[in-house]
Amino acid sequence: MHAFRPNGGHAGPATKPEYYPATLASPTPAGCAISGLHLTSPMEFSIPAAALVAGRAAIVVVSPLSLSSRRAAGAVRCSAATKVSSSAALLTPADVGEPLFNSAEVAQWESGKCVNAIAAAQGIRVRRRCRPAYPSEGVGADRAVPRDILEQIVWDKEVEVSQRKRAAPLHAVAEDAAAAHRAAPPRDFAAALVDARRRNGGAPALVAEVKKASPTRGLLRDDHFDPVEIARAYEKNGAACLSVLTDEKHFLGSFENLEAIRNSGVKCPLLCKDFIIDIWQIYYARSKGADAILLIAAVLPDLDIKYMLRVCRSLGMAALVEVHDVMELDRVLKIDGVQLIGINNRSLGTFEVDTKNTNILLEKRGDIIRKKKIMVVSESGLFTPDDVAKVQNAGVSAVLVGESLLTQEDPGRAIAGLFGKELIH
Ligand SMILES: O=P(O)(O)OC[C@@H](O)[C@@H](O)c1c[nH]c2ccccc12
């Protein structure tokens, strides 16, 4: 495949595609070449995604502002679409053709600001480290110490993902995801929530979490932790969906757990609970059997969320977009295509929990959420039937619960205790 650079210059042979970090708002450092090509704008970012799914395609992303570039985009779009349709049913030609970004977003990309500045302007406190640094950004002591737990987790995640990508590049993982799709397409996470809620007379659907440990609580179970046994018990006792922690360092989770649960015959849709910072992780999660992923607004700038939602759609997966405060909620409500919002009662910065958080945010923005027909999941810190009733009254469709179930001897039977009644399976 021939691809060209809008501003002239040499386009090398496309042999080893490498994925540019997922944050589209991050400007490409001078000389950063992807498959020998220069990335200049996010406007046609569906093309690299498509091309990477196809495996060996070259990538070009061109500025939408020049006519010649637009022609280039068209040319590349066609060849990428052709390749994709012949390779895997992951991205549809319609996905590839649809424009991704509006002019304001392109202007943001072209502003030359570093991703941390763009993220900070959106109220995101987490700074990214494995990003091209710009002279204006400054380096030094303030960047060496993580600000809070979330920032530490994200910095560790950057290292983990770059190592994992070295072992299994995106095109290989995308092939695995395509194979997983052929073997068993994703299950409908949102529909499972709707069905469970209907079965249970309007009680919020349960997303039950399989989690061995957490940064603040340490190990959640004294005795043994058998993820498959716990998953089966949850399903048997009426959980609509399961959330499986895959972060190893801070939650002692693993993709092996996710895969084992998927292969155990458990039918509930599975949410891969991790800190997603790169689309590589989404393809990887799918290849291991995830049906849904978590996108955390405190970590991801708007353009990343938008792009990642699109990757999820192309893979047939759902995305639960997590917010903790009204500023994050407002950002997410401006993004089209969000179907599931998680309101986390726990701050990922301090790990403090306030279960009133769900009700506070829904009092403020419930009208817009209902108008947009978005389903809300109340996450974290729910222990009693009273806790569940309160968020149910606030209008949530589902609750995501881990600790209060996992710390009991029988996590499956603990479900009836949490809801004050048995849930219908
Ligand atoms: O164990 P709890 O308090 O019931 O919370 C579950 C879930 O909400 C929590 O684990 C969680 C919410 N958002 C996250 C993001 C990453 C890791 C974990 C989480």
Image (cartoon, rainbow, N blue to C red):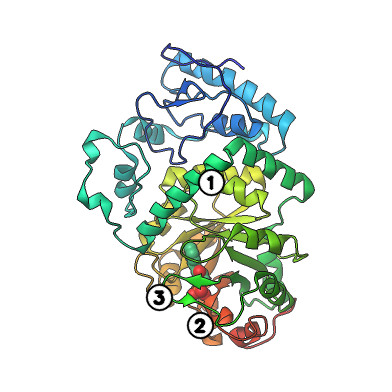
Instruction: Looking at the picture, tell me which residue is in the foreground, 68 or 82.
Output: 82
Whole-number angstrom distance, CA of label 3 to CA of label 1: 32 Å
The answer to whether 303 is drawn above or below residue 266 in the figure is: above
Label 3 or label 1, whichever lies nearer to me, is 1
Residue 334 in view, yes or no? no
Instruction: Looking at the picture, tell me which residue is in the foreground, 374 or 353.
Output: 353
Side of 153 relative to 56 (left or right): left
In this rendering, the count of numbered labels is 3
Q: Tag 3, which secondary structure?
A: loop
Side of 75 relative to 126 (left or right): right
Instruction: Looking at the picture, tell me which residue is in the foreground, 222 or 299.
Output: 222
Earlier-in-chain disc, 1 versus 2: 1
Label 2 or label 3, whichever lies nearer to me, is 3
Q: Which residue is tagged 1?
A: 164
Q: Amino acid at mark 3?
A: Val
Q: Amino acid at mark 2?
A: Asp
Side of 309 relative to 333 (left or right): right
In the image, residue 133 lies at what x, y percent? 30, 37
The label on residue 35 is none
Side of 314 relative to 267 (left or right): left
Whole-number angstrom distance, CA of label 2 to CA of label 3: 13 Å
| Quadrant occupied by the C terminus | bottom right
Q: Which residue is tagged 2?
A: 387
In the image, residue 40 lies at what x, y percent? 41, 25
Q: Residue at x 65, y 84 (%)?
A: 410
Earlier-in-chain disc, 3 versus 1: 1
Label 1 or label 2, whichever lies nearer to me, is 1
Q: Amino acid at mark 1?
A: Arg
| Quadrant occupied by the N terminus | top right
The label on residue 353 is 3
The answer to whether 246 is drawn above or below residue 54 in the figure is: below
Q: Tag 1, which secondary structure?
A: helix
